[in-house]
Amino acid sequence: MKRIFVLTAIVVMAGLSFQSCSKDETEAAVVDQELLVANAQIDVSNEMDFDLGLDVASEQDTYSSRNGVSSARTFPSCATISIENGTLGQFPITFAVDFGTGCLHNGIVRSGIIRITFDDYLINFGSHMTITRSNYYVNGRKIEGTVVYQNQTTNAEVPKWSRTVTDGKLTTLTGSVFTFSGTRTVQQIEGVGTLTLGDNVYEVLSGTHTVNRPNGTSLTVTVVTPLIKKYACTYISQGQLNLQGALLDGILDYGDNTCDNLATYTHSNGVVYNVSL
């Protein structure tokens, strides 16, 4: 029997199940499952918030000076957008996206407020999009922190941003707390020439994140093969991350660019884990 195990993290904020094929393979249980799923929850939450920022920029005419940008909103109709500071058409401007006490969409319940500040059109070189979370929960897990996207485009046909996460914190349903931070580089590789978001494809080129427990246990996550994130797909569909921690040493592989919730983690001892997000 192949040494294959199953790890399941439903959507972004569910528990992790761990099953082995046979008793003689229990040595694989030393893998730090809690850190592995926490990292998955954090990454997907960051991607969801980026999509949200794109939606707000498109809908509120802060994406580009071009008019007529069309958006198929990825956040639910039960969320409301309001201008918290500033005037539409001028910068800086801050929008508040309010999910209320519970807003259900695609099986995900979000509550609280995300604030998004633009100091220029998102597509302009040097501009910043700053995302902050206020009493913000995803399926009952609290997500905190600030994410700043800085436009670093040098070729207009390939928009590029750095993404820096600071003061990140995940509090699980059981009260476990993980802090996280790091920087990645993101660029758009498809859909640049159209005024719609639906055909956009983004590539996470490089970068490193760290995820920490209060007791000092940490996980370092580094992009080794660019991650592909389609705007039209909830999940990362391709690419690899290197995971290094006290009980994690291996590669998380998102697959062949198929839009699905499947990935695999291969530990350094050769054991393969099927991960369902």
Image (cartoon, helix red, strand yellow):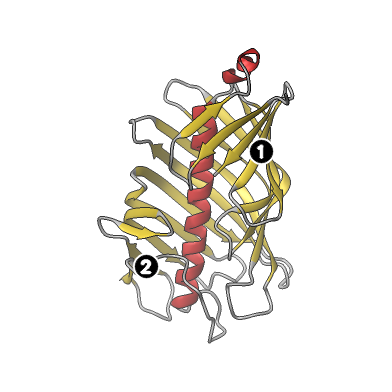
* Residue 93 percent across, percent down from the top left: 40, 70
**Tag 2 residue:** 95
Q: Is residue 238 above or below residue 242?
A: below
Is residue 246 among the parts visible in the rendering? no
Question: Which quadrant: the C terminus?
Answer: top right
Considering the numbered disc 1 on the image, is that residue within a helix, a strand or a loop?
strand
The answer to whether mark 2 and mark 1 are in CB contact below 8 A is no
* Residue 234 percent across, percent down from the top left: 54, 57
**Tag 1 residue:** 264
Mark 2 or mark 1, which is nearer to you?
Answer: 1
For image coordinates 37% across by 52% down, the residue present is 133
Q: Is residue 277 above or below residue 148?
A: above
For image coordinates 51% across by 71% down, the residue present is 120
Amino acid found under the numbered disc labelled 1: Thr
Observer-nearest of 250 and 126: 250
What is the crowding at mark 2: few (fewer than 14 residues within 10 Å), some, or many (at least 20)?
many
Considering the numbered disc 2 on the image, is that residue within a helix, a strand or a loop?
strand
Observer-nearest of 70 and 121: 70
In the image, 88: left or right of 29?
Answer: left
Residue at the bottom extreme? 67
Question: Which quadrant: the N terminus?
Answer: top right
In the image, 151: left or right of 135?
Answer: right
Determine the CA span between mark 2 and mark 1. 37 Å
* Residue 181 percent across, percent down from the top left: 51, 40
Observer-nearest of 85 and 253: 253
For image coordinates 25% across by 55% down, the residue present is 101
In the image, 178: left or right of 228?
Answer: left
* Residue 137 percent across, percent down from the top left: 34, 48
For image coordinates 51% across by 35% down, the residue present is 37
Q: Is residue 256 above or below residue 70?
A: above
Amino acid found under the numbered disc labelled 2: Phe
